[in-house]
Amino acid sequence: MHNVLKMSDTSRSGFLAFKERRSRKLAGRCTPRDADIFWLRFERYFEDIYYPLMDLYGDRSDFSEQIEALFDQMVDAYADRAESLRLLDLERQFTPDWFEHSNMVGYVCYPDLFAGNLEGVREKVSYLEELGVTYLHLMPLLDPRPEPNDGGYAVVDYRTVKPELGTIEDLKALATDLRERGISLCVDLVINHTAKEHEWARRAMAGEEKYLEYYYTFPERALPNAYEQTLPEIFPDEAPGNFSWYPEMAGDGRWVWTTFHEFQWDLNYTNLSVFREMMGVMYFLANEGVDILRLDAAPFMWKRMGTNCQNQPEVFKLIQLFRGLMRIVAPALIFKAEAIVPPDHIQKYIGVKKTVGKQCELAYNNHLMVMLWSALATHKATLLSYVIHKRAPPLLIDCSVVTYLRNHDDIGWAMADEDLAEIGEDPFLHRQFLNEFYTGQFPGSFAKGALFQFDPVTKDARISGATASLTGLEAALEQQDESAIDLAIRRILLLHSAIMFRGGIPVIHMGDEVGLLNDYSYLNDPIKAKDSRWLHRPSMDWAKADRRHNPNTIEGRVYQGLLRLIKVRKSTSLLHSFALSHPMWTDNDHVWAIGRDRPEKSIMLLANFDDDWQSVNADIIRNGGLVGHVHNLLTEDGSLNISQGRLYLEPYETMWLVGDE
Ligand code: OTU
C-alpha cells in the first residue's frame, strides 16, 4: 500500500507493527480484497484511535496486552461480518451523507407497546412504510433486570434480547427485513451503566478484584461526599444521591456510583477492559445488522472531582475511539449521542471544528424541542428567532441531528439562562410559567401534562405528557369543543412541520401520527406510579390507527396532515441536512422565519405560533434570498395570501417557501 496519508512516523511504525502481526490471521478468514479493504481503513483511521488510546490508557501497566486484545477483537469482528453487511459498509462509504437526505423520516417506539414483540414489529413494517419511515428507533430491547428497570435502561445481558420480545435471531431477521425495505434500525445501547444483576456487577458484589474495577466503588463515604459537592441529581424525587450502599459487597460493604437509580451501576471507563467489553458489544450489534446505536447517557461516561461529571474531555476521546474503531470494522453503523445537555455542549458530540468526522454522526437537537414548546406556550417565536441568530449552528459536516417533539423522557427546560435574560424573560419565572402552562394550571392553558421530578427546594421540575395532550387535543375533546379541536390539530402539525424543516432526521414519537393522548393507567401500577414519564408511553391504539384514512376523524386529520408534510419533505432536496441556517427576524413576534441555504437554492419556513391570523412584511421573501415566482410547498396550489405588502398566515399555519429560479 502507498503512504498517501499524512501519518507521524511513530503512528506509522505502530500501524505497520499491528498489521504485520495480524495480516495472516485475517487472511485466512476473508477474501484478499476484503482484507485489503480492512487494512486500508485501519491505516486511514489509525491516528483517530491511536491518540485517544494513548491519552486515556497509555500509562496503564497492562496497556500493551490490552491493546493487542483490542486489535484482535477488531480482526475477529471484521472476519465475522456478513458479506451483505460488508457490501453495505462500502455503499455507505460511497454515500457518507446517507443519513442526511431529506428522505430520512424517523419513528420511535417501544417494541412491546407498539406491536407486542419483535415479530409483531415485523408485521407492522408496512404501517411504517405507509408513513414514509426510513429510520426506526426501537426502545431498549436488550435483556433488562426485572422491573423496576427504568424502562429497560438497566441491562443484564447485552447479547440477549429481552425474552418477552424475542431472540437475537428475531432482531437480526427484523433488521434484514427493514433494510430490504429501506428502513435503518436504531437500537439503544446503555453504555454508562449496567444493571446491578449484570454478571460483572454480581462478580464485583462477590468481591472479585477484576470486576470491582469495572465500577466505581468506595469502602468509605469520604470520596462520595466529596464528589456529591458538585454532582447534580438526575432523579431527585425518586432516586436521590449518586451513590448507593451495599453492606454485603466485597465482604465489608461498598458505596457504588449510581448516577441514576440504585440498580443502575455506572461503569468505570478508566479501565480499558470496560472499554473493550463495550466495544465488543457494539461490534456484535453491528454484525446483527443494527444501523444506528443510541449511546445512552453518553455525557456521564467520565468522572472528575470538582465537576458535575458530565461532558468531560475524556468523554469525547472515548467517543472518538468508538467511532474510529467502528469505521474500520463496520462503517455502515453510525452513532447517535444521547446527550441532553446545554446548547453549547451539544455540538461537541457531533464533531465540529477540529473534531469533524471524529465524534458521533448524530445527536439529539434537544434545544429546538424545548424552544418549540416554549414558543407554543407563549404564542411567540422570540426565543427561537433570537437563539438562532445568536447560536446559529455552523455548517455541520459529516454529521447531523435528530429533531423531535417528544420522546420517552420528560421535557426539561434546558434553554440557556442568558438567552432568556437577553430576550427579557426571567429564567426562573419563565420555567415556572412553562411548568404551570403544561400542567394546565396557567389561566387559558390548553395543555394537559404532569410534573416530573419536582424538587421542592429549587422548585425545579420537568414536564411529562403526550404531544396531543400538551397541544390541547385532550382538553378540547373533553369539552367537545370543535374549534378547540381544530386548533389542537393545527398545533400538532405546526410542531411537526418545524422539525421536518429544521434539518436532520425528524423522529415521530409513536402514536403522535394519530394523536394518541396521555395514558393515565401507569398511576395504578405501583412500580410506575412515581415516574410520570409513563404518561406518554401508551400502548399503540390500533383502533385509532385504523381510522387514519378517514379524513372525518381526528386521527385521519392528524395523520393526513403529517403524511402531507412527509411527502413534501421527501420530494425536495432542499431539506437535506447539509445547509446553512439563515436566521431572520419578522416584524411580528408571533411568526418565526428561518431559511436554509443549500447549494441549489434557498428554502424558507414561516410559522405562526398564534391562534389567530397573523401577517408579516412580505419583503421577507426577497430578504430570505428566494428568487423568481415564490410558492408554498405545503398547499395544493402553493399560492400566497399577500395583501398591501403583508403576507398572511392562518392560525398556527406553517409555510415552506421556495422560488422557482
Ligand atoms: C437517559 O436519559 C434515558 O433516556 C432515560 O430514559 C434513562 O432513565 C436514563 O438515561 C438512564 O439510563 O437524565 O432524564 O444527558 O439526560 O441520559 C433522563 C443525558 C436522563 C441524560 C439522559 C438521561
Image: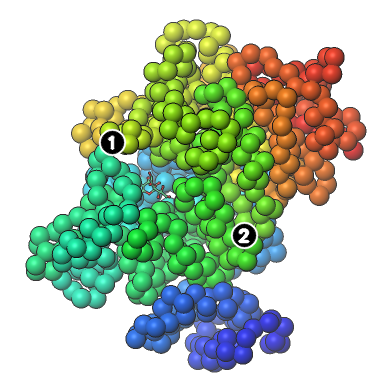
Amino acid type, label 2: Val
- For label 1, the crowd category at 10 Å Cα-Cα, with few meaning under 14, some 14 to 19 and many 20 or more, is few
Tag on residue 209?
none
- Give the residue displayed 35% in from the left and 85% down from the top: 62
Tag on residue 352?
2
* Residue 110 image position (x, y, % from top left): 41, 41
- Give the residue displayed 72% in from the left and 28% down from the top: 586
Which one is earlier in the sequence, the residue at label 1 or at label 2? 2
| Residue 435 position (above or below residue 84) | above
- Can you tell which quarter of the image residue 610 is in? top right
Query: How far is disc 1 from disc 2 in space, using C-alphas?
Result: 38 Å
- Give the residue displayed 67% in from the left and 58% down from the top: 397
Tag on residue 457?
1
Q: Is residue 135 visible?
A: no
Q: Is residue 101 left or right of residue 55?
A: right
Amino acid type, label 1: Val
- Can you tell which quarter of the image residue 440 is in? top left
* Residue 222 image position (x, y, % from top left): 19, 63
| Residue 648 position (above or below residue 220) | above
Q: Is residue 579 left or right of residue 552?
A: right
- Total labels: the figure holds 2
* Residue 553 image position (x, y, % from top left): 54, 16
The residue closer to the viewer here, 240 or 350, is 240
**Quadrant (top left/top right/bottom left/bottom right) for the N terminus:** bottom right
- For label 2, the crowd category at 10 Å Cα-Cα, with few meaning under 14, some 14 to 19 and many 20 or more, is some
Q: Dot 2 lies on which element?
A: loop
Q: Is residue 472 visible?
A: yes
The residue closer to the viewer here, 356 or 434, is 434
Within 8 Å: ligand 1 and the Cβ of disc 1?
no
- Can you tell which quarter of the image residue 189 is in? bottom left
- Give the residue displayed 19% in from the left and 68% down from the top: 203
